[in-house]
Image (cartoon, rainbow, N blue to C red):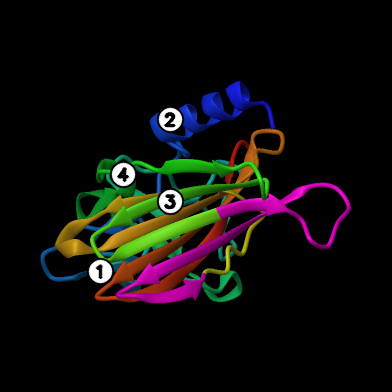
């Protein structure tokens, strides 16, 4: 690998946020908020969204929600919530009760390269939690590279399933010591996938994966 090229990539990885779209958690003192069938406080409640659950807004092309037209409102956000894409709750959440994860501080990724093994390592660390992505030659293909993601939490190493064609990640520090791990795929014609995990009290939980970008 060209050393100058690698250094440039490493610097950009540390300075440029890996993602620019919005992803939310609730910001409610009760620890939960209602999801409603319509964008108003009198609409029926379809479910509750709890602290540390990650969710994304509906994209512009997703113009239906359970067969009904999506309503875009200044005070309410149309979202779907859940780790299983086929069983997600869909509805509206009052915008005052949510916060964009991008408003939290992101831990700076550190990048290193082992020239002998042709392996680059991207690491983010917060206290006793370390997330590492190794980019190495793909063992199952003659050409190409693969990314492997692991987390060390309280000394225990865990392999993280990315659910997407992983290219990059960011680790954000939320309220009450909670961490939010965002995984990002390659851009394909202004389209990419994201997957999110929460790390709370030493437990890592898959929150879901979504398509993002231009429809």
- The residue that disc 4 covers is 106
Q: Residue 162: x, y in percent?
A: 58, 63
Vertical order, 192 against 157 (above or below):
above
The boundaries of the magenta stretch are 134-159
Residue neighbourhood size for the residue with mark 3, other residues' Cα within 10 Å, grouped as few (<14), some (14–19), many (≥20): many
**Rendering coords of residue 53 (x, y %):** 35, 67
Compare marks 4 and 1 and give the one earlier in the sequence. Answer: 1
Question: What residue did someone put label 2 on?
Answer: 16
Between disc 4 and disc 1, the foreground one is 4
Residue at figure coordinates x 26%, y 42% from the top left: 103
| Quadrant containing the C terminus in the rendered view | top right
Relative depth, front residue between 78 and 133? 133
CB under 8 Å between discs 4 and 3: no
Question: Is the residue under label 4 in contact with that under label 2 (CB below 8 Å)?
Answer: no
- What residue would you read off at disc 1? 51
**Was residue 132 drawn as part of the magenta stretch in this picture?**
no
Q: CA distance from mark 3 to mark 2?
A: 15 Å
Q: CA distance from mark 2 to mark 4?
A: 11 Å
Q: Which mark is residue 123?
A: 3
Secondary structure type for disc 1: loop
Kind of element beneath mark 2: loop
Number of numbered discs overlaid on the protein picture: 4
């Amino acid at each position: 690998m060209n050393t100058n090229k690698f250094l440039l990539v490493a610097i950009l990885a540390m300075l440029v946020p890996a993602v620019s779209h919005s992803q939310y958690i609730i910001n409610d003192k009760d620890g939960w908020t209602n999801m409603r069938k319509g964008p108003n406080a009198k609409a029926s409640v379809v479910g509750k969204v709890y602290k540390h659950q990650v969710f994304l807004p509906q994209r512009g092309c997703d113009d239906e929600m359970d067969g009904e037209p999506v309503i875009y409102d200044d005070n309410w956000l149309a979202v779907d919530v859940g780790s299983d894409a086929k069983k997600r709750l869909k509805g509206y959440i009052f915008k005052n009760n949510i916060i964009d994860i991008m408003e939290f501080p992101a831990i700076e990724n550190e990048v290193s390269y082992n020239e002998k093994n042709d392996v680059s390592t991207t690491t983010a660390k917060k206290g006793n939690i370390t997330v590492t992505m190794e980019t190495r030659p793909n063992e199952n293909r003659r050409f190409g590279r693969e990314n492997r993601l692991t987390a060390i939490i309280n000394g225990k190493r865990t392999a993280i399933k990315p659910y997407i064609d992983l290219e990059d990640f960011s680790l954000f520090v939320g309220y009450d010591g909670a961490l939010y791990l965002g995984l990002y795929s390659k851009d394909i014609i202004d389209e990419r996938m994201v997957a999110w995990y929460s790390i709370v009290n030493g437990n890592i939980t898959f929150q879901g994966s979504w398509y993002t970008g231009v429809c």
